């Protein structure tokens, strides 16, 4: 005959805190988990019907799968001194409603709270260094999460399929958002990427269908493959000046996306980065306009007529941007026995290259003219006598010097 777990007194909230009620096994088994699969009762296995657990102060790590699939578990009190929560430790604890990490926890392992479908509140501690793959995957009632600044990387799928997640706060200190971290978080409406993040990984925000606002701060260098794929509510996006690479399908299927503001005209945009963006008509380049305006303000107004000769390019008017139209084409994509037509939208690179070359030419012309004038004046100042032939002091900038100037524009 199997032994029943030792009954424990479970404090119930009453008007008189001195009143205690003894629980029954049918109601709740409250016990203290002591590590190595032991609990403060009988036997060596966490009972299936446990509803409340307190981790013993001596425990530094919760072992792999310790509370896996304890579907009645509603509350866990984690002790100060705990360092690691093991792989799948609370996976499929479908009644667990909240979790608060003590200040000593450094690591949440893979799948630790995966499919805890009643988990509404999670408090992560400052000092936490790592959140493993799928750690909170499929926590479908989780509403908000704040990542402390001590976390550098969020691993694959950590918060994927958290369909009620509407608020995400990312802190400075984060360097990379991993593969599919917030994939299919369909309630997420806005996200601000900290300036310390230099890479958004593949599928990071894939199918975040309610996402309307994305703030990409300075520091970001790479937007990974399908990072914002099927963010169908997104209407505009500003690509910060240090982004050098937008990978394939990065914004595929963003069907409401109307315009993209790009602050680095030299960014490498991979094929089909904007495929199926059926509403996308314009790419804006504010930095190019600033360069163009500086040339005009310097008196070289003949560039205006040459800009006007480039058809369909908008650069005059109230907006301080240069707008290059998108070009689109329909291509066939074989899918087994059927063929799908895909709309591919791209920057009109021919017009972009023409504008960049035109602006660069005038910048070099202006820079070399100023440099030649400076050399001329220096030669006159160095010449002796009032009758110095000023024309003879004039010096033209050699071609290699002009190339050097161009490198710094």
Image (tube, rainbow, N blue to C red):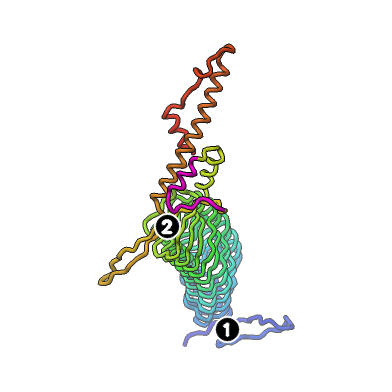
Badge 2 crowding class, 10 Å Cα cut-off, few under 14, some 14 to 19, many 20 or more, is: some
Residue at (49, 40) in percent of width and height = 302
- Can you say whether 32 is above or below 248 in the image? below
Magenta stretch encompasses residue 96: no
Residue at (32, 63) in percent of width and height = 331
Seen as rendered, the residue at the extreme left is 337
Is disc 2 placed on a helix, strand or loop? Answer: strand
Badge 1 crowding class, 10 Å Cα cut-off, few under 14, some 14 to 19, many 20 or more, is: some
In the image, 284 versus 78, the foreground residue is 284
Say whether disc 1 or disc 2 marks the residue closer to the N-terminus: 1
User: Is the magenta region chiefly helix, strand or loop?
Assistant: loop
Numbered disc total: 2
Mark 1 to mark 2: distance in Å? 63 Å
Seen as rendered, the residue at the extreme right is 16
Q: Quadrant of residue 280?
A: bottom left
Q: In screen coordinates, is 333 left or right of 157?
A: left
> Which segment is the magenta one?
302-317
Residue 290: x and y in percent read 54, 46
Residue 205: x and y in percent read 47, 64
Is disc 1 placed on a helix, strand or loop? Answer: loop
Look at the numbered discs 1 and 2 and tell me whether their residues touch, using CB distance below 8 Å: no
Residue 195 visible? The answer is: no
Q: Looking at the image, is mark 1 or mark 2 nearer the viewer?
A: 2
In the image, 395 versus 4, the foreground residue is 395
Residue 270: x and y in percent read 38, 55
Circle 1 residue: 28
Residue 367 visible? The answer is: yes
In the image, 366 versus 260, the foreground residue is 366
Residue 326 numbered tag: 2
- Can you say whether 300 is above or below 388 in the image? below
In the image, 174 versus 397, the foreground residue is 397
Residue 272: x and y in percent read 37, 59
């Amino acid at each position: 005959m199997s032994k029943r777990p030792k009954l424990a007194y479970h404090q119930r909230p009453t008007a008189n805190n001195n009143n205690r009620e003894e629980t029954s096994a049918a109601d709740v088994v409250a016990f203290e988990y002591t590590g190595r699969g032991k609990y403060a009762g009988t036997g060596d296995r966490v009972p299936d019907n446990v509803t409340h657990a307190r981790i013993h102060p001596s425990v530094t790590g919760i072992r792999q799968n310790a509370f896996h699939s304890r579907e009645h578990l509603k509350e866990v009190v984690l002790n100060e001194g705990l360092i690691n929560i093991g792989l799948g430790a609370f996976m499929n604890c479908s009644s667990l409603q909240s979790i608060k990490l003590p200040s000593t926890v450094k690591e949440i392992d893979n799948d630790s709270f995966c499919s805890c479908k009643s988990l509404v509140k999670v408090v992560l501690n400052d000092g936490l260094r790592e959140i493993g793959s799928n750690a909170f995957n499929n926590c479908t009632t989780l509403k908000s999460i704040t990542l402390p600044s001590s976390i550098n990387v969020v691993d694959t799928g950590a918060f994927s399929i958290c369909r009620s997640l509407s608020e995400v706060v990312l802190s400075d200190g984060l360097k990379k958002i991993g593969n599919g971290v917030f994939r299919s978080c369909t309630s997420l409406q806005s996200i601000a990427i900290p300036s310390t993040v230099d890479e958004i990984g593949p599928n990071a925000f894939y199918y975040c269908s309610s996402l309307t606002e994305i703030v990409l701060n300075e520091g970001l260098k790479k937007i990974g493959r399908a990072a914002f794929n099927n963010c169908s509510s997104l209407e505009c996006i500003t690509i910060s000046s240090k982004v050098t690479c937008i990978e394939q399908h990065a914004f595929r299927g963003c069907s409401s996306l109307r315009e993209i503001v790009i602050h680095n005209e030299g960014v490498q945009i991979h094929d089909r980065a904007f495929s199926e963006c059926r509403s996308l008509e314009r790419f804006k380049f504010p930095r190019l306009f600033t360069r163009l305006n500086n040339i005009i303000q310097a008196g070289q107004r003949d560039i205006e007529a040459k800009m006007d000769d480039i058809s369909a390019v908008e650069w005059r008017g109230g907006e301080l941007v240069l707008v290059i139209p998108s070009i689109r084409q329909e291509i066939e994509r074989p899918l087994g026995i059927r063929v799908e037509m895909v709309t591919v939208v791209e920057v009109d690179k021919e017009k972009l290259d023409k504008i960049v070359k035109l602006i660069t030419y005038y910048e070099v012309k202006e820079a070399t003219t100023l440099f030649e004038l400076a050399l001329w004046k220096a030669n006159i100042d160095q010449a002796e006598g009032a009758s110095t032939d000023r024309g003879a002091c004039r010096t033209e900038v050699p071609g290699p010097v002009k190339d050097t100037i161009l490198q710094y524009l």
